[in-house]
Every structure is written in C-alpha cells, then in structure tokens.
Amino acid sequence: MSSVPTIVVIGASYAGSAVVKSLDTSLKTKANIILIEEKESAYSTVSGLRATVEPGFAEHTWIPLDKIFVHNKASKVLHARVKGVTSSSVTLSTGENVSFDFLVVATGAVYGAPAGTQFTYVKDHVAQSEKIISAIQKADSVAIIGGGVVGLEFAGEIATDYPSKKVTIIHSGSVLIDKLKPTAATTAEINSQLASLGVKVLLNQKVVPKHGNSILPNGATFNLSRQSVHTASGETIESDVQFVATGVIKPNSEFIASLNVLDEFGYIKVEPTGQVKGYPKIYALGDVSNLDIGKLAYLAGSVQGPLVAANIATLIKNPNATTLQKYTPAVPGQFVVASIGRFGGFLQTPVGTFGAWLVALIKANRLLLKRTHESYNQTLRYKGIGNKVKNPHKSSSFGFVVPIAAVATFIAVGYTYFTR
Ligand SMILES: Cc1cc2nc3c(=O)[nH]c(=O)nc-3n(C[C@H](O)[C@H](O)[C@H](O)COP(=O)(O)OP(=O)(O)OC[C@H]3O[C@@H](n4cnc5c(N)ncnc54)[C@H](O)[C@@H]3O)c2cc1C
C-alpha cells in the first residue's frame, strides 16, 4: 500500500455516498477516494414515484455530486461505467484502468421504470416523467400489477393527486405487501386508506404474461396506452395506463462475475464485515450485496455504509487490525414504513401500527427528498405544491391503529426513520 491509499467506490447512491461521506470525515487527507458513478448525478429512488404524478418534481430527484467531498478535495468523482474488476483494479467504459488499495462495490440493482431509472442524464428522466404525467392526466383508468410496497405506493401517489382516476391494484397474494409480513392492524390501515382514495384492489389474481414472457408489449414495465391484462383465473382488466410493480429486481453485478463471488441470484456474497468472500480488500453493500434479504436505502446508507467505512478506516490506520465491525441483518417486516400518496401511509413497528398523519410527517410529504439532498451537502430547491391537492385523510383523527404512549412512537420513529 502506498503512503496515501486509494479507495475506489463504485456507485454514488445511498450505499456508496454513505461510505464516501464517512471516509471523507474519518480519514480526511489520509486516503484518496475515487467515486465512480455512471449517472450524471445521484438519483433518489425513494422519491422517484412522485415524479410520475407531480409536474416539475423529477428534476429534484437528482442530486449533484460536486459537494460530496468536504475534507479531502484531492478526492474525485469519475463519471463512467465500471466494466470489469480484478483484485487490484477496475476497468471503466472509457477504457481507463483505476488501481485501488480498497474497493467498495455499491452498484445497487435495477428496478423496472418508472420505479427505478436507468437513465444517465437528468433531462431524459424529466422527459419520461412528463410523458407519464400527461398520460395519467388523460387516462380514465390505471392498472398497477403487483401489490408489494412499490405497487401500493404507486397507487397512493396516483389516487391522491388524481382522485377522479379509477386506480386498480392487481395482486397475486391474499393481502397487499404480503412479503413484508403485515400485521392485521397494518392491513386494516392500508385497506382503509385505499378505500378512502377509491383504489380498487383485486387479490389472489396472478396476471399472466401475454407477450412472450412479459405482461406488457416489448417487455416494458409500463405502458401508456389502452391495454388489457389477463389473470390466471380468467379475468380481463382493461385500463388506459399500466404499471408493472411485481418486485423483480436485478443486481448490477455482472462486471464482478469473473471473481466468482456471486450467489445464484447475482448478489455479491459478503462476510458480516462487508468484505467480499475471498477478497478482503473488496467490500460490497446495499442492494447489490447479499447482506440483507430486504433491500432498503435505510440499511444501505445508515447502517451498512458507516460500518464498511469504519472497517476500511480501521485497516488503513492499522493494517494488522484483526477486530472489524460485523453486520447483523435486519429482521424482515419488523419495521415497515410506506407512503400511500403525499398525505398517507403506515408505519408498522413491534409496538403497533401508525397511520397517515405520522407517515405524512416523516416520509410521505416530500419522500425524504430534503434529507437526501442534505446527505450530499446540497440544498433542496423544491418548494412544494402548496394546497393544490386535497388531503383525503384530513378529517380522520390522529390515525392511530394501536394507541400507545407518544414516547414509544418517537423512539420507534427515531430508530427506523425510513426503513421498510
Ligand atoms: C419506488 C421505490 C421506493 C423505495 N422506497 C424506499 C424507502 O422508502 N425506504 C427504503 O429504505 N428503501 C426504499 N426503496 C429501496 C431503495 O431505493 C434501495 O434499497 C436503494 O436504492 C439501494 O441503494 P444502493 O446505493 O445500494 O443502490 P442504488 O440506489 O441502486 O444505486 C446504485 C448506484 O450505482 C450506479 N451504478 C450501477 N452500476 C454501475 C457501474 N457498473 N458503474 C458505475 N456506476 C454504477 C448506479 O447508477 C446507481 O447510482 C425504494 C425502492 C423503490 C424502487
């Protein structure tokens, strides 16, 4: 290792930016950090669905990377796609090779658009979002295929901002968000909020692919013209706009496959320390790693990121250190928070489920955009839309499903902040 080690971090989203920020703070000029990101800016997936309903919102879901380094100005951001990795260097789409002493892989996973975006440039995402908004505005009916958290949040966004549209969720399970183990209280809260928004829910209805392996023409994950979808039980649902939210995600890990570190689903196999199995100088975290079953920005950015950064800092300060921090995977479904439109949602905790008012406060209002901007040392310029959209939950009481002391609420919220 040279006197000032080089740490290469691939991916500047929740996981990668958390590692970079922690290392920049803890090591200052004792290491050079090279952050490699193919996108022009970081994209806030957590806020992205609002861009499909609110004109002008999309541009704010992208956050510039120019202020990410505060203490070590010699560190830098390279915009390129990583194509290959060896035990000591990465190859970029530009043809450049970058050597490292430590490598952090934080390349996430692909979510179907528009829940996720594969665009490199802000302008392309903005243009796509405007097209979707315009199609929703013209539509009478919208079908959402898949009733996991993304499908539920999507339905909430559309039904809240466009109450006259007929929104239908088609879900194969017997309850919505079944994979997250909702309690009876959570299910009751979801059903009540969807009912007040007029969202129709079809349960136990598996949509069958009618276009090769795909539900929509050309393998698309959304479609902005009239189409019918068909369920295994013989129902046909017609709608003007369709979104597929079946929860299929694909880890961005192909560039590291040659090191034989991928599990059967393509996730990078890591030790509890964040080190890739068999490669102690290479770390992986966030959606691309197999550290957690549930893939969450909160776990990637607030828990795994600081842990990986601390372990690297320990080894830089003392290469012979034998005690590194170890990660304990989150219990799926223990804490779940989802928005249902800009005024609604629920927070499931071990002490009970909380409703619209609390989730509007901690998440739904701006989908954590301010906090995400601040985590890149940027200021959010978005001012909100005032009271253009009516709050369907306003007359409801505080939205408690289980009445418990306020103190417990805030401990739970502080603990989870934006977990699912
Ligand atoms: C609609 C929606 C809502 C969500 N809401 C929540 C929520 O409320 N709370 C929560 O905790 N989680 C939420 N999630 C999950 C959350 O978005 C993910 O867990 C999180 O984005 C994972 O962060 P990451 O940094 O690991 O990966 P990503 O966010 O996927 O980032 C990976 C980065 O790596 C870059 N990259 C990829 N490959 C390469 C390459 N080869 N070379 C260079 N750069 C590359 C990408 O451009 C990207 O910037 C939501 C997900 C969706 C789809």
Image (tube, rainbow, N blue to C red):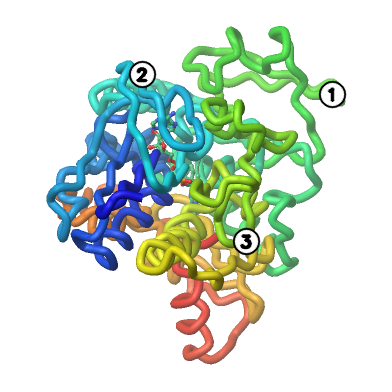
Amino acid at pointer 2 = Ser
Label 1 or label 2, whichever lies nearer to me, is 2
* Amino acid type at mark 3: Pro
Give percent across and percent down for residue 262: 66, 36
Q: Mark 1 belongs to which amino acid?
A: Ala
Residue 174 in view (yes/no)? yes
Residue carrying label 2: 93
Can you identify the residue that label 1 sits on?
A: 232
| Distance of label 1 from label 2 (alpha carbons) | 43 Å
Q: How far apart are marks 1 and 3 (CA)?
A: 41 Å
Specify whether 147 is left or right of 160. Answer: right
Mark 2 CB within 8 Å of ligand 1: yes
Q: How far apart are marks 2 and 3 (CA)?
A: 31 Å
Q: Quadrant of residue 40?
A: top left
> Is the Cβ of the residue at disc 1 closer than 8 Å to that at disc 3?
no
Quadrant showing the C terminus: bottom right
Q: Name the residue under label 3.
A: 272
Give the quarter of the image for residue 196.
bottom right
